Image: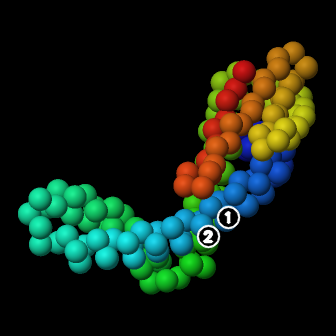
Amino acid sequence: MKNLIDILTSETQSLKAQYIQFTDEWANQEFYRLKQWLEDYRTWHTENFAKKEMINECSRKEKIKASIPYEVFANKIEEFVEKQIKNAEKHYTNSIEKLALRIEQKQLNINNLKAVTSHIGVNIDTTLTDGEKVVRAFTIIANGEINRPHYRYLIK
């Protein structure tokens, strides 16, 4: 399986680079979005804390505040972005390992394995063959202004 993971890792370097870039851009925007949310929350909290009818809303907002990473409170954008990129790299490694397990279940002859990869827009398409069986693995990438960049491998 180590050989298959090495093949998949070398074939998907463009995916990794693009995914890390998307994560970096998102993390920078997310940091400032969270800072703005905290500022808005402080204003809202000052105005509504003592109101009985706002107790449920106050509780909900406290839960959201508790989920915000320490780096945002400490105003450490570099650490926040670095942490998000490390998480993205870990996700990439885990997804390659999961993909290798799924491909291994197809019982391809790893010794004769050939891989061809193409990058189509933001997605990647890898075709693996041992001369007899063909397995196609492709990604679906999603990201946006608020959504953290993420992707999934699909196999046919």
Q: Nearer the viewer, residue 145 or 81?
A: 145
Give the CA distance from mark 1 to mark 2.
5 Å
Residue 57 image point, x, y percent: 22, 58
Q: Nearer the viewer, residue 8 or 146?
A: 146
Q: Nearer the viewer, residue 134 or 53?
A: 53
Q: Residue at x 87, y 15 (%)?
A: 132
Residue 131: mark: none
Q: Residue at x 39, y 76 (%)?
A: 39
The N terminus lies in quadrant: top right
Q: Residue at x 82, y 17 (%)?
A: 133
Badge 1 crowding class, 10 Å Cα cut-off, few under 14, some 14 to 19, many 20 or more, is: some
Badge 2 crowding class, 10 Å Cα cut-off, few under 14, some 14 to 19, many 20 or more, is: some
Residue 53 image point, x, y percent: 11, 59
Lateral position of residue 49 relative to residue 30, left or right: left
1 and 2 marks in contact (CB < 8 Å): yes
Three-letter code, disc 1? Glu
Mark 2 element type: helix
Residue 68 image point, x, y percent: 40, 68
Question: In this picture, is 111 found above or below 73?
Answer: above
Q: Which residue is mark 1?
A: 25
Residue 147 image point, x, y percent: 55, 51
- Is residue 74 visible in the rendered image? The answer is yes
Lateral position of residue 63 relative to residue 136, left or right: left
Q: Nearer the viewer, residue 105 or 19?
A: 19
> Residue lying farthest top?
132
Residue 77: which quarter of the image? bottom right
Three-letter code, disc 2? Asn
Lateral position of residue 115 relative to residue 74, left or right: right
Question: In this picture, is 113 found above or below 67?
Answer: above
Q: Which residue is mark 2?
A: 28
